[in-house]
Structure formats: C-alpha cells, structure tokens
Amino acid sequence: MTFLITCPNCGPREALEFSYGGEITRRAGPGSSSAELTGYLFFRENANGWQTEWWLHRDGCRMWFLAERHTFTNEIRRTYPPGSEPPVDAQAPEGAA
Ligand SMILES: [Zn+2]
C-alpha cells in the first residue's frame, strides 16, 4: 500500500520516493542522567495515532523535513521544513540557548 506525502519543496509524491527517519525525539542534553540518555537512545513512543516524524525525499530533492502522520491510517496532516514550526516536543532541551 502506498500513499502520498507532500514534500515542502516538491509537492505531493508517492511515499515510495521517501525514506522514513523515525519519530521526532528530544535530545538528551549535557548533564543528563544515564536513564535520560538511555531513553533518548533506545525508547520511542510508538504511538497509535498522530505522530511527528522525520522524512527524507530520497528520490527527489533529498530534503529532510517533518511530517505529522497518523500511524494507523497513514494520513499525513501536514509537512514542514525543520525550524519553520517546531512542535512542542522538538524544542531544545532546557538550559540550551
Ligand atoms: Zn522534495
């Protein structure tokens, strides 16, 4: 089964042109505990619902961007370049400038 993903640079394309980069995570900052670092490296939400993810337009412009995708239906709510509209969980760790 395939679906359409809208590349912010190229427009709608078949999902076969893209590579999945994983769900967005919050990077463990300096001074993080080993539990926080382990969580960042090995654990994911794996949500059954809406999730913000990294995608690469591998067979197109090769741009990395963020997509809000429903993990059950594969519906894409929106796509945007990183930094243009950071979701809450993509913000810099506390204490980072
Ligand atoms: Zn593209």
Image (tube, helix red, strand yellow):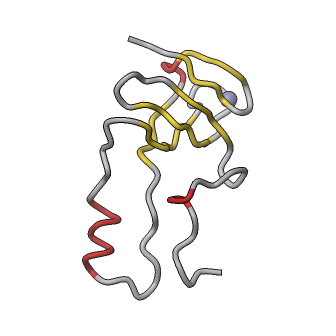
Which quadrant would residue 50 be assigned to in this image?
top left
Up-down relation of residue 39 to residue 15 (above or below): below
Total numbered badges shown on the rendered structure: 0
Q: Residue at x 30, y 44 (%)?
A: 46
Residue 18: percent from left, percent from top: 52, 28
Q: Residue at x 56, y 84 (%)?
A: 95
In the picture as drawn, the residue positioned furthest to the bottom comes out as 31
- Quick one: 67 or 73, which is closer to the camera? 73
Up-down relation of residue 65 to residue 44 (above or below): above
Residue 7: percent from left, percent from top: 66, 29
Residue 45: percent from left, percent from top: 32, 51
Along the horizontal axis of the image, is 66 left or right of 26?
right
Q: Residue at x 33, y 42 (%)?
A: 47
Location of the N terminus (image quadrant): top left
Along the horizontal axis of the image, is 60 left or right of 54?
right
Up-down relation of residue 3 to residue 43 (above or below): above
Along the horizontal axis of the image, is 79 left or right of 33?
right
Up-down relation of residue 58 to residue 92 (above or below): above
- Quick one: 39 or 72, which is closer to the camera? 72
Location of the C terminus (image quadrant): bottom right
Residue 79: percent from left, percent from top: 63, 35
Please state the quadrant of the image where ligand 1 appears. top right
